[in-house]
Image (cartoon, rainbow, N blue to C red):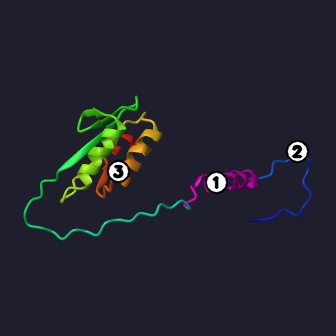
Amino acid sequence: MSISMGATAEGDVVPDMNTTPLIDVMLVLLIMFIITIPVQTHAVKLDLPAPAPPTNAPIDPVFNQVDIDFLSNIYWNKTEVDLRTLKSYMKQAADMPSQPELRLRPEGLAKYSVVDEVMASAQQAGITKMGFVGNEAYAN
């Protein structure tokens, strides 16, 4: 890169490329990239169960499914129930010698307060095996 030390007449073309706008654009893009990176400070503490030892016999899992629709209707194994009946069913399931899995399947437009009540009822009943079904529908 050479520097011209001599005097130039006004209106002469400067053969060097002006890199100032390029640097400005690159700095703006860098700042936008840094701002859009999500901050990874939120953590959820989970108590995961210990892995079960493998068995040679195939296990047929017994499960109960709780569906919640957008009208706040609660279904226990495809039968509509109220919250009081649901709590009694959960208590009976929790008292079984081999506790069945509880599969919770809320619709996308279901009210969070109803889903929260069902989850709290499951915890109060002593359900230890619970999972969410159908989350793959909300992946996109």
Classify residue 86 by image quadrant.
top left
Q: Secondary structure at mark 2?
A: loop
Q: Amino acid at mark 3?
A: Ala
**84 left or right, relative to 37:** left
Residue at 18% x, 59% y: name it.
98
Q: Nearer the viewer, residue 48 or 37?
A: 48
Q: CA distance from mark 2 to mark 1?
A: 42 Å
| Residue 112, placed above or below residue 47 | above
Front tag of 2 and 1: 1
Residue at 28% x, 50% y: name it.
91
Is the residue marked by circle 2 packed among few (<14), some (14-19), or many (20+) residues within 10 Å? Answer: few
| Residue 122, numbered circle | 3
* Picture coordinates of residue 84, whole percent (x, y): 35, 40
* Picture coordinates of residue 139, whole percent (x, y): 39, 44
- Magenta-highlighted residues: 16-40
Instruction: Reply yes or no: does residue 5 show up in magenta.
Output: no
Q: CA distance from mark 2 to mark 3?
A: 82 Å
Q: Which residue is mark 1?
A: 35
Instruction: Reply yes or no: does residue 36 show up in magenta.
Output: yes
